[in-house]
Image (cartoon, grey):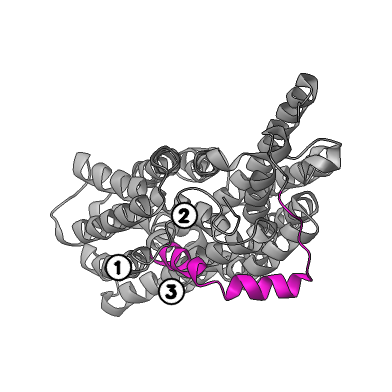
Amino acid sequence: MTIDPTVASRFARLRWMIYVILVLAYMTAFFHRMAPGVVSAELMAAFQTSGAALGSLAAMYYYIYTAMQIPAGVLADTLGPRVGVAIGCLVAGAGSVLFGLAETFEIASAGRLLVGLGVSVIFVGLMRSNTLWFSERVYGAISGLTLLLGNLGAILAAGPLALALQATSWRNVFVGIGLFSGLIALLSILFVRSRPEDAGLPSVQELEGRQPHPPRARHWLLDLRGVLTTGAVWPSFFVMFGVTGSLLAFAGLWGVPLMRDSFGLDRTAASLYTTVALSGFAIGCLAMGALSDRLGRRKPVIVGASALSLLLWLALTLLPWGPGWSGLLLYGLLGLVAGGFVVGYAVAKEVVAPGVAGMSIALVNTGLFLGAAIMQPAFGWAMDLTWDGALADGVRVYALADYRNGLWLSAGFAGVGLIAALFVRETRCRNITLSA
């Protein structure tokens, strides 16, 4: 079948416009995920919390995000990314404003919960949109690009946020990002289309001269049961749980306080280290997704990244490092190798029927946020076990030995991820449920 060049050109323009809008929404999700680490001292002072309580407040985002991943996948496969992302941005925006205005710990927790509820549908919707607007041949690379751009939101929640807090309060920042989320919701309604066919365009398969993927033919509950019982999906789930969950818990909450308490850095200087870690993570996602596509393999990238992640957690725990090049190197490499997790999303969509890719991606993504939800308060709990009672302006101050307790836990989580990686199914970068 010959495609009119004007149709192909319109397809490309609309695809990238949709992608930019959804990525902006995803960047706000990453900002919310990482920001508590930079404002941890303000949150402890404002709400008079312990390390474990602060971990629970920050992880409120992860609790609801984790619980919502399967519903997010169902929503992406049924109503489509356009509806899900628009509603999600509105809810997250309201939660961010509530968090910024909160005067009590309970209201702040409710705001954080709403943020997690709203952003929980954004990533799965974006990844599902990518399966419909981009070729399978570049899905690893486009997934890496997506994570790289999303991580810009995380980077904004590190060093740039620390600088912004010198000019305004943390409350104003969260109110502002909430209003921005409302704007993205409006753009989603106006310009996003869930499928090329919704805009009167051929599918990406038809553009490539192939037959379009068959649509879902069963009730979504039957499709969901099929995804949950597909054994090849679950190894990627546990890779996300161990390798990426531990990194996000650390970079999103404990990485800045470690440098502040253990080495006496101020917040701006300490946040540079998590900025480097998140920058490495963003670069790693792009590089490893593209590497997987180029190799035509998924498993070697996932196994190698998981093994290196475990080694780097052990290095942070055992080696004599500190501020300067050694700390920046370890933080940066930790983020870089964790970027290999992005290949797990490609595996998730390649081991199930194309019509349920959203549910499979959502299931795998659940592992990531379950790991972070458990690890954030667990890290704080581990530090509280050996805390000597030191306070500074009413805020708990932990020693490096206390932080090592949490680093050992992180290494354990990465070990779980490595074991799971060994069982990942090799798909050779194609959907194995379709005939060759």
User: How many residues crowd around disc 3 within 10 Å: few (fewer than 14), some, or many (20 or more)?
Assistant: some
Q: Which residue is mark 1?
A: 415
Magenta stretch secondary structure, dominant: helix
Q: CA distance from mark 2 to mark 1?
A: 24 Å
| Element carrying mark 2 | loop
First in sequence: mark 1 vs mark 3 = 3
Q: Nearer the viewer, mark 1 or mark 3?
A: 1
Q: CA distance from mark 2 to mark 3?
A: 41 Å
User: How many residues crowd around disc 1 within 10 Å: few (fewer than 14), some, or many (20 or more)?
Assistant: many
Where residue 427 is drawn, which disc sits there?
A: 2
Which residue is at the front of the view, 289 or 380?
289
Q: CA distance from mark 1 to mark 3?
A: 24 Å
- Residue type, numbered disc 3: Ala
First in sequence: mark 2 vs mark 3 = 3
| Residue 139 % position (x, y) | 55, 43
Q: Is residue 330 left or right of residue 133?
A: left
